[in-house]
Amino acid sequence: MSTRTAAGTPTHREDVDVVGRRWRLGVGLVIVADASFVAAMLFGYRYLRGLNTEGAWLPHGSATAPIWASWLLAAGLLLSAVVFRWGEKGIRAGDRARLVLSSGVGLFLLVMVGVGQVVQIASFPFAIAASAYASSMYLLAGANLFHVVLTGFLGLAMWNRARLGKYSATENWQVGIVSLWWAWVALAAGVSALTTSFIVSPAIGG
Amino acid sequence: MRRLNVVTAVAGGLGLALPGWAIARHFLEENDFGPDQVTVITMVCWAIGFMTGIGAFNGPIGWLRGHDLTPEDELFLAGKDQGIRRYFRFTTDHKVVGIQYLALTMVLFGVGGTMAMLIRTNLISPNSNFLSPQEYNAIVGLHGLIMIIATIIMVTGPFGNFIMPMMIGARDMAFPRLNALSLWLIVAAVPVLLSATFLGGIPTGWVGYAPLADQAPPGMDAYMMTIIIFAISSAVAGANITTTVLTMRARGMTWNRTPIFVYGVVASVGLAIPAFPMFMASQVMLGLDRTMGGRFYVASGGGSPWLYANLFWLMGHPEVYVILIPAMAALMELTAVFSRKPLFSFNTAVLGIVGISVLSVMVWAHHMYASGWAPNLNGAFMLTTEMISIPTGMLFLVILGTIWRGRIWTRLPMMATYAMLWNFIIGGITGLYLSDVPLDYALHGSMFVTAHFHYTLMGAGLTGAIGALAFWFPKMTGRMLNERFGFISFWLVQIGFNVTFIGMFAVGLAGQPRRVFTYNNLLATGNFVSTIGAYAIGIGMLFLMYAVISSWRHGSLAPSNPWGSKTLEWTVPNPIPLENFTVLPVVTSDAYGYGEEPFEPIEGPTRRDELEPAHVGSAADEQSTEGARP
Amino acid sequence: MTQTEPVTAQIRMWWQRVEIKRIVWIWLGITVVLAIFALIVPARVMGSPASPTMRAVESTMTIFSVAAAPVMALVLSVAVYSLTGWRSRGSEPPIGDGPPIRGSGRVTATWMVVSSVLTMFVLIWGLGEMQSLSAEASAPNAMVVNVTGQQWVWTFSYPQNGNVESDQLYLPVNRPVVFHVTSKDVIHSFWVVEMGIKVDANPGEVTKTGVVPDTLGTFVVRCAELCGLLHAHMETQAHVVSSTDFAAWITAQESRAS
């Protein structure tokens, strides 16, 4: 996926902008697929909550996870995405150092979020088998962790490649698509936090 | 990178899976979910090891480290100068990937078809005792899943990859490495899928309904992992194909001038991109239920089987159009050629494909009329489902209109169109019956449903794929497909098919449930007839396999455009240069100018050995890698 | 053919074409054959109906099949004719192209209208059917029978009749009955074949279906959803008896239980 060599076929080179737009569309489509996965998980949460089969969505008196934790992690992700975007704007103007800094900081924030996500999972006051609510929380948290790890790989790559001088004012489409993905991951975490903020449906009561 | 191939992939897979299995067993065997945890861990290790061994991670890791591929690396990856070895590697050339998909598809059909023979043999009489109930249920599930995967990839895989880029005047796909990735992920998944055989099988039928899936043996974990891997492959392939078509069509190829096959492939993956991840999500939830005691589908824990059913069918219905649309589009493409007429009402064809695609995401709960999940919604889903018959009918209009007053050349590809017309009208009409809610209450879960979807997916879908193979075989292999054996196969398969499944409609109407290893004595005749038909299909398919393999090796050499088709892929010479076009074509009209442009004599499948030998194996053309020799 | 000529004259000219005539005759022939098939075969194969529901199912099957006959015949007649009238003979390639017919607004429009009308018909028929059948099943004096599916047996209990339990289904003739269906383990599907009713049995949920059995006799109850190893054997019988016989059976069951 290098800038210089992946632009077109081995013997016929294409314009960098053309390749960049193409990759942006490709990543956009992968985001659509991932969004469908996230939507399915959130649908699962809402549907099971609504059905409350045998009254066992959240058995009376069970512990629930603190809502603020998911929001904090989502905020951390959002911050990291914003930081990286700042770096993306920098490289568009030719500022390599800004990209290196922002991807480093962004990566650091991702690691923090990742650690925090692990802590959240480990400190859930319920086992995965406790209820449908519990299972859903583990699933959503696990999926978020997966997102964070994947994005961490990309962040590390960005930092390293920026450091090596791979990007410039004219060749930075890879930065752009990583930024796009990063923003999506932050959005997914936010939507997830929003959904799991509603724990008991009117049908269940408190 | 240069030493990696399928052998190192298998070694990598085993190399990680065996220790993974041993370690997992040591630590996890004792607890409740031990067997499933061990199975899943082993399979994940296999997949990661396999993909490492084939070199799938080399690209991303090299990228992370800042080591980018040189043009020589890229040429190597594209398979330059490697002869037959490039088919056993992580090769990026779309033509190689297309052939790999074709081989993979044939293997899957072979295994799934053999299972079908076993199933029908067991049902030849009410108490054949050919298979035990457990074996029978396991084989039914495996047959279903293998066939679903095979039919999903059967047109888009070989022809969407090999033919489509040339058809739009491109040199390769948008993301050649992702192309290879999507193929090798499926190759990695096949052993996982087949391992179900000795893990207790898939006893739930291909739908894998929970909570039966929760209590199933570890074969169910094979189902789960296969789907997860397959969903990733599909998402990647979908992004690749869509981006290729949207951004890499030749100059002048406006949407009006884009061949209908391209529309079909894009619509198919366009549906797959949002649909398959929903299935994947249902499987992850199943995985959590099975390996950690999750409560997604367990009623006593607040879970619901309706969650599974909804997620499944949200995928499951679009998925049948993922299967069907490319096959129909390929038939539309070849019908124009073999009628020597423009495609009748191109806009209607596009509208039909788009209409089917859009509606297909709104009909899913017609599979759940009898489930009781939302009886008040049954009417709404009846409406959307019956409306789908309108765009589907449009496709019939296009094909009939194309045939109308044409000069029909009844070669094997065209016969596939006729077979489809017969099979799909039956499949479509029986689908209409099932869309009617009260009728569905009587027919759901019976062999009538089985017959209906075989008529559509196999009678129209697989037939279309075989037509596509017969049509594009000369371009893909440089040889003509043996038509004598092709026709023997065609008649055996089509007649056998109709005998089998009309028999099945009958026993379904008479009350035989589906997925049963035995049945009421009164239904013996219908079942017996079905089984005989099935054997005819089996023999016919063997003829086809023989025809394909022997023609590939010894078939008469094909001219560059034996059928006189006007689409771009036929303008490239055989053997096909590595990057297809030295100069990218500029398109000034669509590919359906039959009767409008001056008639160019059709070369036809004449033997050209006298002319070819000097060209075959010529080292002068360094870039040629395709179609020259077996 | 210009737009200015009256439609009847155009149709007459169109009819003059040999191929049109032949196709229409083939179409008529196939339609008749298929219609006869439709009128006789499906209902016969489905067997004797044991309820108004099944009667409606069988007549719908017949009507839809008869309506489908001309549609299928259209596809087949064009296909069949093309193989004789428009075929390029021999295995050599054709030596010319066909006429460059890119489309026909008229044909497409007609096709769309006809297919929409047929779809509407099927839809309205279906909705009407659903209306009358749901009215039946929710009749106020309907008897309630609880149906429980479990791997791999059906159990019936009669909450309004002393909570009698049985593994055979007994029903009084001509009395609306509503089934409350559930499962103890996996998804099953409660299917009274000859009465044309079916609803899934889900763990943790109660689903409903209803019917009016109007024929005396013994009928089969099957499971219609793969539920494990012996799904094929998950079968029992439904006995439709007179109300007096039913009352007697209830009494017998009650005394057996006590």
Image (cartoon, rainbow, N blue to C red):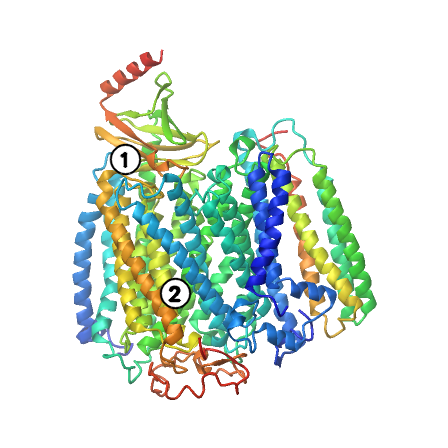
Residue B90, given in percent of the width and then of the height, sits at 57, 67
Q: Quadrant of the N terminus of chain A?
A: bottom right
Identify the image quadrant of residue C146.
top left
**Image location (x, y in percent) of residue C33:** 17, 57
Nearer to the camera, C161 or C88: C88
Say left or right for B18 vs C100: right
Find residue A27 and report its horizontal and vertical position in percent.
62, 63
Q: Is residue C213 left or right of residue B552?
A: left
Kindly indicate the quadrant of the structure image that contains residue B455.
bottom left
Badge 1: chain ID: C
Q: Is residue A172 visible from the viewing direction of this image? A: yes
Residue to which mark 2 is pinned: B465
Q: Are marks 2 and 1 in contact (CB under 8 Å)?
A: no
Residue named by callout 1: C195
Q: Residue at x 58, y 65 (%)?
A: B178
Q: Quadrant of the C terminus of chain A?
A: top right
**In this view, A70 is above or below B178:** above
Tell me what residue is drawn at x 61 percent, y 54 percent: B15
Tell me where residue B64 sits by quadrant: bottom right
Chain under label 2? B
Q: Is residue B59 above or below residue B44?
A: below
At label 2, the amino acid type is Ala
Taking the image as shown, residue B523 lies to the left or right of residue A190, namely: left
